[in-house]
Image (cartoon, helix red, strand yellow):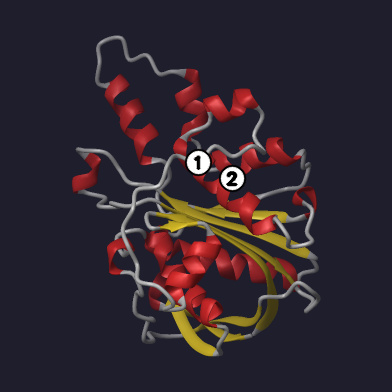
Amino acid sequence: MIDVSVRGVGLLAPGLAGWAAARRVLAGEQPYRYEVLPEPKPDALPPNERRRGARTVRWAIAAAQEALAGSGIAAADAAPVCASSSGDGEILAQIMSALAQPAREVSPTRFHNSVHNAAAGYWSIACGSRRGAVTLCAYDASFGAALLEAAALIHAGESTVLLLVYDLPYPAPLLAVRPIREPLALALALCGEARAPTLARWRIGPAPGPATIAPMPISELASNPAAQALPLLAALARNESASLHVALAGGCTLAIEARP
């Protein structure tokens, strides 16, 4: 098991406009109300990149900015780990539509936004970082895989890691085969040492075989694979200890022992 400290959280989803609002809902202090969020406009991105970046990029970077604000971690110092269950469905649909036309002309901007590491690249531009970034995909187990990767990097000697997990809805007709209906972007500022400000300490490690996955606290967001983080964030919001499992690939799970 690997010990990590949570130094900051960023969260955007319908009805969860930032971690401060989401914490009250996840802690049970106020009921969840579904509300469509305005599109984020992260000021960390230069104007040209903000205009050219895909929706997934803007959502991910807005969550990253919130997680780092007040964490005591400089953006350029954190090693990024980015994960999406299946990439940017909107860009994919646009490219497939273009390829179905006789001219088969694909916009260069759409093409560079279609790569799976687009958010990591834009984040490097936003904070002027020259650090290597990890971008991964494990389909519906992407949150667990990304959290395990982040913990492994800390165990290997990284002082701070910025974890970004995000998925946005797919448009029709792809929505019929990939029914992600609501957007969600999560960012966690993590480090190995328990120094202030520390919101919680987590012990993380893979567990063989099946285990009971924590129930989803907000059913309206359950179609989004990134929402698998919500039970863990609910324990954080309530400032309580918890033993949870999240899905990994191959029938395994990731065990998390959370304590304030």
Return the x and y of residue 100 as percentages of the image width and height.
Answer: 25, 21
Amino acid at dot 1: Pro
Mark in the foreground, 2 or 1: 1
The residue positioned 58% from the left and 81% from the top of the image is 205
Q: Which mark is residue 113?
A: none
Amino acid at dot 2: Ile
The residue positioned 34% from the left and 67% from the top of the image is 32
How packed mark 1 is, by other alpha carbons closer than 10 Å (few <14, some 14-19, many 20 or more), is: some
Front residue of this view, candidates 25 and 63: 25
Which residue is denoted by mark 1 in the rendering? 40
> In the drawing, does residue 112 fall left or right of residue 217?
right
Q: Quadrant of the C terminus?
A: bottom right
What separation in Å lies between label 2 and label 1 (alpha carbons)?
9 Å
Instruction: State yes or no: discs 2 and 1 in contact (Cβ < 8 Å).
Output: yes
Point out the tag, 2 or 1, that comes first from the N-terminus.
Answer: 1
Q: Which mark is residue 61?
A: 2
